[in-house]
Image (cartoon, helix red, strand yellow):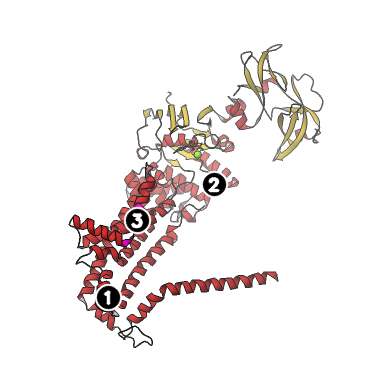
Amino acid sequence: MSGSAELNRSRTVDWALMLYVVLAYAFVFAPIAASFVFSFNSDRFPSIPLGEFSLDWYRAVATDPLVWDGARNTLFVGLIVGIVSTALGFGAAYTDYRYKFAGKQVYLALALLPPTIPVIILGLAMLAYLSRINLSGNALSVIISHVVVCAPFAMAIIRLRLSQMDPALEPAAWNLGASEWMAMRHVIVPFCAPAIFGALFITMAVSFDEFAVAWFVSGLNETLPVKVLGFLQGQVSPRINAIGTFVFILSMTLVILAQLLLSGRGAKPADKE
Amino acid sequence: MSRDTLVSFEGVVKTFGSFVAVQKLDFEIKKGEFLAIMGSSGCGKTTTLRMLAGLEAPTEGVIRLSGKPINDLPTWSRDTPMVWQSLALFPFLNVRENVEFALKMRGVGKAERRKRAEQWLDRMQITEFAERNISQLSGGQRQRVALARSLVVEPEILLLDEPLSALDAALKVRMQSVLKNLQRETGITFVYVTHSQSEAFSMADRVVIMSRGVIEQIGTPQEIYRTPRTRFVADFLGSSNLFSGKVRAGGQGQVLETPTGQFVLYGQVAAVGEAATLTVLDTKTHLSVEKPAGAVNVVPVRVIGEEFVGATATLYLETAQGQEIRVQKGHDEIADLPTDIGQSLYAWWNPQDGHLVAEA
Ligand SMILES: Nc1ncnc2c1ncn2[C@@H]1O[C@H](COP(=O)(O)OP(=O)(O)O)[C@@H](O)[C@H]1O
Ligand SMILES: [Mg+2]
């Protein structure tokens, strides 16, 4: 039968594509996997064959007050950055959705610009600016800098969600007696809820991982990535692997949560039929 | 303005930039009537409805609701709920919450809200779907939710913007009778926008025909059907044969001189020398094999085609000048006519069945 030949060929292609995807992921995740494996390895230096399974490095990290400081700073900064960036991003996305005004293209371009600026330049600029207004060298300066980097991500995510909304939905709420604020609260925000939480988690993850800008402006309130550089400058230690694994798992959790929210049932465009 | 007027448009104009979407609307909507606004796509129907709902501000003129100007009243302070073309149901709320929405926005308490929503769920026969998501409903069920959601505040007027356009033909007809009955039972004024003649004529007490932002005619479906006021309306309805020409003084009265021939007009209807169009309903246009004795308005024609829809047959004919003429009859009425393609026949009508309109 001619059908079976076709079936065979497409199965081969399927396998090839599958292999390709697996290899691509392997390439991307190999360093992370290596770091993960070596974080449980008793040997001082990363080498094959592996030594014994050991939680020593985690113990070393967990008992290091400097690491705890860094973790606390990271979480604190990440939480605030997530909330502030998402709020700003929502405002910017809604402004874009709702209003037509002269110079809107410029407004959009500026709002989406920060992530395209090389982080070294952004970090330096932030340092120069924040020290001029006496804000550098503390957690607030990291928060401000990270919000600049993160808000555009939040805006992009929420803007996409708003573009899937039936344009009649908000006027329908007004028409049923909702003032503009009530419509915002009872229609726009609930409709965007998956994207709002998605943006919150993504911006927190970006803040957790961000190093360069934080290094420039953090001063004594170092976040974990900055701390890691400190370790590396002193000595190469598998403790780095332990911290890396911890940060990676945290970030991945947030990204996966965001992914579930953004592609889940609730996020599907409402009016397909 | 009479006592039974609910809404009046007085010289209402709406422009978008330099584009005039609606020009000089002057008409009234009576309390408790079913008014259809009909016209082809882009003629300004939705804009008119949106101005009444307060979603668009008139550029000029005044809109009154119960005598009071409402130009500056925001939509959320008006009781002019609208059923949207897309229905615009809230996808993150279930059926009951959708229906309760307007009451919630008005600060009605939870128990009262539930009770009043229940009544409308029941009335629209969707109680069993109350806890469902919108995405789990069929097209017809969504229509009912949209109606319940708008009517739950028991408004004086309900605005509907082509709400049936997404439904299949059979369901459309069913929903038409649901709407008509609902309007009759509640006595709520319905303003129904549609581009469909059959929807407008089957449901409405009065029809407004719009074209390019202008009202062409307002009247009952019968008035409009029998006596279209402009050539545009006659053309739009597509149920008449049209003959354009000049009015002349004739033997006992007036005649219309057209390229197809001279036709006797019924009574003194127009100024001599004026350009005008004679409209004759296709159901009032007759056919015969021999030139009918005594008939005054006769046109020799040839058969070019025929079509059967249900109980009626439509014959398509052509004059010597190439003008198409349609004749609609019951099957038995044309059974004894030879209707082969190319067959020569005579089309004729009685002068009192001809209706003269101003040349458009
Ligand atoms: N917000 C708007 N901005 C510019 N033009 C508009 C706007 N709304 C409607 N129009 C135009 O006004 C005309 C009438 O539109 P509409 O009232 O929606 O027509 P209908 O409902 O009869 O199809 C159309 O040509 C449309 O393009
Ligand atoms: Mg429309």
Q: SS of the residue at dot 2?
A: loop
* Residue B324: quarter of image: top right
Residue A257's x, y, as percent?
38, 65
Mark whose residue sits in front, 2 or 3: 3
Which residue is label 3 attached to?
A: A152
**What's the distance in space between the residues labelled 2 and 1, CA to CA?**
65 Å
Q: Amino acid at mark 2?
A: Ala
Q: SS of the residue at dot 1?
A: helix
Range of residues picked out in magenta:
A111-119
Q: Is residue A112 above or below residue B205?
A: below
Q: Earlier in the sequence, mark 3 or mark 1?
A: 3
Which residue is label 2 attached to?
A: B166
The numbered dot on residue A232 is 1
**What's the distance in space between the residues labelled 2 and 3, CA to CA?**
38 Å
Q: Is residue B116 above or below residue B64?
A: below
Tag 2 and tag 3 share a subunit? no
Q: How many marks?
A: 3
The verdict on label 2 being within 8 Å of ligand 2 is no
The numbered dot on residue B119 is none
Q: Is residue B111 left or right of residue B216?
A: left
Q: Is residue A175 left or right of residue A1?
A: left
Q: Amino acid at mark 3?
A: Pro
Chain letter of mark 1 equals: A
